[in-house]
Amino acid sequence: MAIETAIVFLRALAQGRAIAPITVIYGPQAFLREYALDSLRRRLTADGFKYRALQIGGADNYRALMSELEGAELFAPKRLVVVRVLRSYRERGSDEGSDDDERTATGSGDEAVLIAACARIDATIRLALVYERDKLPVKVRRAVEQSGTLVNCMRPFDNQLGQYAELVARELGLRLTMRESDLLVARHGGDLMGIANAINKAAITWGDGGKIELTQLGGPGGVRIPELFEIAESLVQRGVGETLALFDRAMQTGRDPIEVLALELIPQVRRMLLAATLLSRKKETGVIAAALGVVPSSPLASRAIEGARRFGLRRLERAHQRACELDESFKNGIIKQREQAVAALILELGSPDRLN
């Protein structure tokens, strides 16, 4: 079987397609790895499979796994065996120097035993291997791709974020409209965990027919803790007063001003600055979106262009320079009143009289 992306794998599970005897989940996106595994567990548990979990790390070997795969279980005729291969397993003894060859041989022997055991798996067992690494061992990949499923959990593209939101909502029996999906992406960006958490919180008070209301996701009228990236969105779409109020509320709930500056304000100002620069050169929306690395319909592109037109090139240049200087001063410990400094930056960007 070909290597699947996480979104293809999740769709297949949602559509009730047959599950291969062996599923290998890997890739750099930790949340996607865990969500794909949890979706697989829910599907097989509903089909009557009993859950068994093992982990391999450090100087461990595959003996426990072999016993689980090849041993009979009176009270669990169907089993889902989940093996988490920790990053430390592949790196064990890396500081021993002269033992590298022996260590490699041991790891290769373990993989050979695993491959042989996988070939003997019957219909009563489903094996899920979760590798906490970006790439798979070559032997394991070649062996599994013949009859199993390889799920590569890469960072999603911007145009896939709404699709992931819809899959999470569907798993909970909820329905998202395009407006709610766009709001989630606008508020959380590429933070899939934040998107999933927002949908799960909304599921607690879901509306009639399983439809999520905009206010349940933190829309107008919702009283809640500011979500990640909401301050950056407010900087573009709302007034400076509301942005400062959101920032103050975030500080009261424990957010770090360095985090707000580095994760929200600087990236947002940088995107607006790039859009403003290209607009000054009479470039089209598609060119600007391509420069930002997103599709033209992406909320990130529309917000960047909207902010560029609202603030103007000169003000954004100064704001970006000031934000970078603040970030450096925070990291060097020069500025101690961090909350006040970030608030002043927001006020400076949102007040034309200060920059023009």
Image (spheres, rainbow, N blue to C red):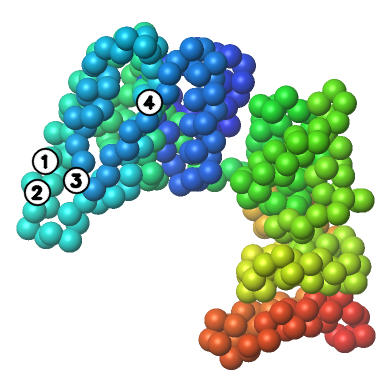
- Nearer mark to the viewer, of 4 and 2: 4
Dot 1: what SS? helix
Dot 4: what SS? strand
Instruction: Evaluate if marks 4 and 2 touch, with contact meaning CB atoms under 8 Å apart.
Output: no
- The residue closer to the viewer here, 336 or 32, is 336
Instruction: Evaluate if marks 1 and 3 touch, with contact meaning CB atoms under 8 Å apart.
Output: no
Dot 2: what SS? helix
Q: Provide the residue designation for mark 1.
A: 105
Dot 3: what SS? loop
Q: Provide the residue designation for mark 4.
A: 52
Q: CA distance from mark 2 to mark 3?
A: 15 Å
- Nearer mark to the viewer, of 1 and 3: 3
Where is residue 5 shown, x and y percent of the image? 51, 32
In this orientation, does residue 174 appear?
A: yes
Instruction: Evaluate if marks 1 and 2 touch, with contact meaning CB atoms under 8 Å apart.
Output: yes
Q: Amino acid at mark 4?
A: Arg
Q: Provide the residue designation for mark 2.
A: 101
- Quarter of the picture holding the N terminus: top left
Residue at left offset 80%, top offset 76%: 346
Where is residue 331 shown, x and y percent of the image? 55, 81
Residue at left offset 61%, top offset 20%: 14
Q: CA distance from mark 4 to mark 3?
A: 21 Å
Q: CA distance from mark 4 to mark 1?
A: 28 Å
| Chain-order first, disc 4 or disc 2 | 4
Q: Provide the residue designation for mark 3.
A: 59
Instruction: Evaluate if marks 4 and 1 touch, with contact meaning CB atoms under 8 Å apart.
Output: no
- The residue closer to the viewer here, 148 or 38, is 38
- Nearer mark to the viewer, of 4 and 3: 4
In this orientation, does residue 298 appear?
A: no
